[in-house]
């Protein structure tokens, strides 16, 4: 008899009003040994009760749905759950105001519906680890088109010079090890600075920190 420790599974909730999309995503994710689809929903109104019952680590959230869309559903989820899952927005078009609003509402990143299966799997794993799925060029375009609303969270944050430098590098999409190499410091030091930046800005993850950086004018879409 062979014994061993079972591979921990990341639970996923799929939210999309298109049944074909839900079926396709379920097939992709359930084929992985470390991912498991716990449930599906066709409307954002179903998300909070399903999350409370199923306790997924990641929600794949369609951004455009009749009734309660992905933006409202993300806001409600983060407002009503003491330990909310990570939200990964699924969208047809990257340059979409709905996507930007969902990211501002608290989503950790977005994924295009035309993404390859390997990209879908990796995206879920990335956000499940507590990281943000950032596409710097896409975020720049979104901020340029829909940002600039004067929401200045940096004015009262009082970031140190080094924290500000780390935030600037975060907006380019660099990982902690890449930032550490750039600044010639240890990765743990960078993790500390990133944690301080998130705490001072009052945001949950890197995506919201980057959006705050653009909306405050700390960095600009033009570079």
Image: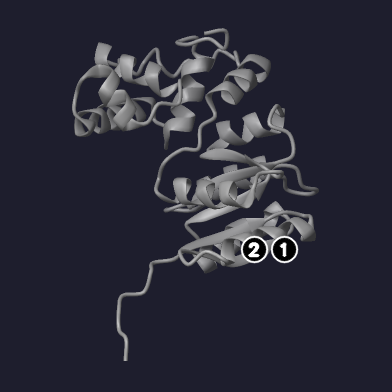
Could you say which is closer to the camera, residue 107 or residue 185? Answer: 185
Tally of numbered discs: 2
Which residue sits at x=64%, y=47%?
116
- Mark 2 surroundings within 10 Å by alpha-carbon count, few (fewer than 14), some (14 through 19), many (20 or more): many
- Mark 1 surroundings within 10 Å by alpha-carbon count, few (fewer than 14), some (14 through 19), many (20 or more): few
The image position of residue 155, as x and y in percent, is 39, 12
Rendered image quadrant of residue 45: bottom right
Which residue sits at x=71%, y=59%?
24
What is the number of the mark on residue 23? 1
The image position of residue 110, as x and y in percent, is 60, 39
The image position of residue 59, as x and y in percent, is 57, 53
Which residue sits at x=78%, y=61%?
19
> For this view, does 9 lie left or right of residue 109?
left
Looking at the picture, does residue 194 appear above or below residue 147? Answer: below
Could you say which is closer to the camera, residue 53 or residue 219? Answer: 219
- Reading the image, the residue beneath label 2 is 26
Q: Residue furthest bottom?
A: 1
Which residue sits at x=68%, y=17%?
145
- Gap in Å between the C-alphas at discs 2 and 1? 5 Å
What is the number of the mark on residue 65? none
The colour scheme is: one colour
Disc 1 element: helix
Q: Quadrant of the N terminus?
A: bottom left
Could you say which is closer to the camera, residue 36 or residue 219? Answer: 36
Q: Are marks 2 and 1 in contact (CB under 8 Å)?
A: yes
Looking at the picture, does residue 64 appear above or below residue 33? Answer: above
Disc 2 element: helix
The image position of residue 91, as x and y in percent, is 70, 41
Looking at the picture, does residue 64 appear above or below residue 196? Answer: below
């Amino acid at each position: 008899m062979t014994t061993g420790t079972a591979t921990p599974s990341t639970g996923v909730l799929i939210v999309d009003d298109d049944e074909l999309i839900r079926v396709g995503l379920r097939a992709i994710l359930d084929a992985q040994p470390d991912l498991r689809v716990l449930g599906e929903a066709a409307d954002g109104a179903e998300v909070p009760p399903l999350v409370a019952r199923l306790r997924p680590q990641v929600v794949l959230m369609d951004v455009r749905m009749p009734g309660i869309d992905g933006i409202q559903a993300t806001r409600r989820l983060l407002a009503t759950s003491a330990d909310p899952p990570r939200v990964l927005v699924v969208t047809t078009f990257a340059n979409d105001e709905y996507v930007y609003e969902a990211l501002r509402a608290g989503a950790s990143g977005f994924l295009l519906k035309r993404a390859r299966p390997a990209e879908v799997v990796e995206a879920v794993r990335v956000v499940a680890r507590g990281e943000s799925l950032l596409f710097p060029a896409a975020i720049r375009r979104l901020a340029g088109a829909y940002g600039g609303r004067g929401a200045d969270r940096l004015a009262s944050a009082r970031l140190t010079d080094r924290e500000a430098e780390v935030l600037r590098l975060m907006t380019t999409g660099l990982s902690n090890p890449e930032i550490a190499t750039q600044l010639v410091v240890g990765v743990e030091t960078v993790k500390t600075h990133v944690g301080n930046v998130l705490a001072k800005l009052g945001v949950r993850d890197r995506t919201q920190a980057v959006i705050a950086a653009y909306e405050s004018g700390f960095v600009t879409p033009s570079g």
